[in-house]
Every structure is written in C-alpha cells, then in structure tokens.
Image (cartoon, coloured by chain):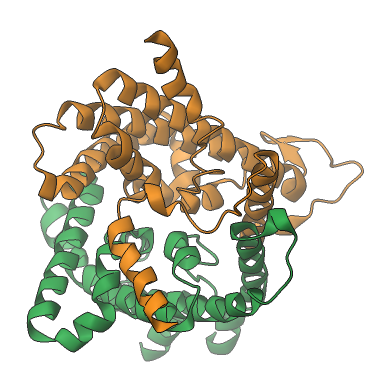
Chain colours: A orange, B green
Amino acid sequence: MAKSLAKEFTKGIIKENPVLCLVLGTCPTLAVSTAAVNAIGMGIAATLVLVCSNAVISLLRKVIPDKVRIPAYITIIAGFVTIVQMLVKAYAPDIDKALGIYLPLIVVNCIILGRAEMFASKNNVLPSILDGLGMGVGFTAALLLMGCIREFFGAGSLFGIPITSGFMAPIIIFILPPGGFFVFGMLIALASKLANKEQPVESTGCASCPMAASCSKISEKEGAAK
Amino acid sequence: MIQNLVAIFLAAILTENYVLNQFLGICPFLGVSKKVNTALGMSIAVTFVMVLATAVTWPLYTYLLVPNKLEYLETIVFILVIAALVQLVETILKKYIPSLYNALGVYLPLITTNCAVLGVTMLVIERGQADATFGYVESLVNAFGAGIGFLVAMVLFAGVRERLELCDIPKSLRGLPITLVAASLVAVSFLGFQGLVDGLLG
C-alpha cells in the first residue's frame, strides 16, 4: 500500500513529468520561465491548485454527473485559482506582478484539468492528493530547470545573483520569446533521448487532454482529406 | 480615434502577437498547425469566440462586478461565461447555419480551455484599468486583432511545418522538438516588427 502510494507521488516527477514527457501546460512553461524565481512562484501556485482541486474532485467524483463533469471541474479549479490569486497578491506582490496574467490562467492549464479527468475522477482521495503533489513537483522542477537555463544565458545570473557579468555578455535572445521555444524544444529532445524512446514525441499530450475526444475529430478530418 | 484603433489592431497582430510574443494558445498552435486548412478553420473559430467573449465579459465586469465590488470573481466568472458562450454558439450554429457548423464546429469545444481566449478578455480589462481611454470599442478591436494575429501565426507556422515533413531530421529531434525550434525561428522573425507600429503611426 505504502509502496503504491509512493509510486503515485514519484511518477509525476520523472517518468510521467507533465511538462517534458506528457507535454502539458506549455503556455505557462514558456511564459514564466524567464527567471528562476518566477518559475518557482508559478510552480508553487500551480501545485497548490493541483493538490486542492484533485482532493475535492476525488471527493465529489460520485456526486458529479458524468455529462457536466468538465464544467464542474472548471468551476472547482477556478475557485481554487481565485484563492491562490488572493494569497499571492497579499503575501508576495512582487511574484504577482511578475506572473501577471499567467496566474489566473492556471484555470485553463491543461495539467490541472488533465489530472482531474485522468486521475482524480477515478481514484480515492489520498492517491489523488499524492498524484497532484507529484505532478506539481514535476511541473515546478521542469519550470525551474528552464528558468535557470534561460536566466543564466539570457541575463547572466541565477536567482538574481550575477554570475557571468565579468567574462561573458548575456545572450539576450534566451529571455525573449524565441529563446523560450528553443530551450523547451532542446529539453524535450534531451528527455526523449534519455528515456530512449523509439517513438518520437509527436505532439502535445493529447491522450491526457480532456478535450481529446473532440480533437480526434480533427485528426479524422485530416485523415479523410488525405 | 481611428488612427488609435488601427494602432491597437496592428500592435495586437504584429508586436504583441498572442502566440509568439505572449505565449497564449500554444497548445492549438502546436497541435492543430499541421495543415494550412485546419489551421485556418481553428483560427477563424478562435477569432470569432475572442471577439464574442470580450463583447460579453467587458460589460459584465464593468457594470456588474465593479459596482458590486466583486472584482476578485473575475477569473471564475469569465471562464464560466466563455464556456457557456462556446456551448451556445455551437448549438446555434448546429441548428441554424449547419454549413458553418461543419466548417468550424469541431474546433469549438477545444476553445473553451484555450488560454488565448481567457487571456484576451482579462488583458483588455487590465489595459482598461491602466489607461482610461481604453474602453469598450478599443477592447473589441484589440480582441479582433489578437484573433487575426493568432491566425497569421498559425497559417505561417503551418506552412513552415508542411515543409518540415520532407526534411531529414536527427532522431531525437523528430516530432515536437523540431517543431519548437521552428516556432522559435518564426518568433525571431516577429521580433523584427518591434517598434514598427509606433514608427508607422506615431
């Protein structure tokens, strides 16, 4: 029992890392990883929402009718996001300013809705909380890794402490949008190389996306057009 | 007035491009951009919902939430309004304009959880708070420009991707990594527009 619970926690960190392996939540990953501090702030905020919403959805999974489950999940998630937004505004106004619009946009982060649909709606409370925690830690770790790389090359510092100021000019493009896409692409390539996957990472984590059902219509249409 | 609106519209397309500069709506950008026609259909649906959502959420925020001091409910109200709106549009199109439904219908459910739509409705409110002259009309123009910017980015990128399929790519870069590198290069080209709008109309 304890072993399987530990597995629910650790799988999100490496094997099923939501960002690098499942490729979920790309928008905040690219947007807030310009500095390591922002990455940690975003990671903690998302983890908090993920754990709380997983717990509540798991508790309510027998009450929510199947047909309206997605709107119900979105409402629950939006409620927690609002709470987190108020907490961040009150206790960490600098982080609030740095994250800006991306803090309320946690609502539509597909990691959270994806875990609700894939895991919390089918499992008990304790595994759901651990799953949320593991996924949150994995998300934070990936964000932090990207944040460190982009801050180091793009601004020549780490956590705001200057490192390369004496001998290397910062490569500013790393903190601009193109650098985000580039570093993210390289990290995914590295992750798939390390995991030694036979199949290349095709597209975003469609299987874990709650909208996969409607999305498959698009691929069908594409298939028919061929 | 008109010059101002044109400036907002062009800025939303070129310098503040939602996909390539603000990282909103990356999932459909990477997921649905394999073919030019699907990219076009998806972005027209997104533009439509963006303008409609802004048209509804802006008055709701200004005339309902603000007078009642309920600004903190912004997130939860907006996402529910967008979800309901998308559902409504889908039902109406299915019943009355089936041809349009066949063209755009499949993309509509995907748009509910698209961060670009929620993002544009919130960003125009934010801009309105910072600048009192940024009212309802400006917000609508901004939303329309954001949608067209999404369309431009999607169609350009779909064109790039169709060419990528013929290339010989190193094994571990195949699939998503090379797509992201290509996106990075398209984003570099959009950096070139920096300052263009001010230079043209300023």
Horizontal placement of B31 versus A128: left or right?
right
Q: Residue furthest right?
A: A167
Residue, x 69% and y 39% (percent of image)?
A194
Provide residue A85's location: percent of width, then percent of height. Answer: 33, 38
Horizontal placement of A58 versus B130: left or right?
left
Q: Is residue B1 above or below residue A89?
A: below
Q: Can residue A86 be seen here? A: yes
Residue, x 28% and y 63% (percent of image)?
A214
**Residue A166 or residue B92, whichever sits in front:** B92
Q: Quadrant of residue B48?
A: bottom left
Residue, x 81% and y 36% (percent of image)?
A163
Residue, x 63% and y 45% (percent of image)?
A197
**Residue B21 or residue A212, whichever sits in front:** A212
Q: Residue furthest top?
A: A2
Provide residue B144's location: percent of width, then percent of height. Answer: 34, 79
Horizontal placement of B141 versus B70: left or right?
right
Q: Quadrant of the N terminus of chain A?
A: top left
Q: Quadrant of the C terminus of chain A?
A: bottom left
Q: Is residue A157 above or below residue A68?
A: above
Provide residue A110's location: percent of width, then percent of height. Answer: 37, 48
Provide residue B67's location: percent of width, then percent of height. Answer: 12, 53
Number of numbered markers: 0
**Residue B120 or residue A111, whichever sits in front:** A111
Q: Quadrant of residue B167?
A: bottom right
Q: Is residue A5 above or below residue A11?
A: above
Q: Can residue A174 be seen here? A: no
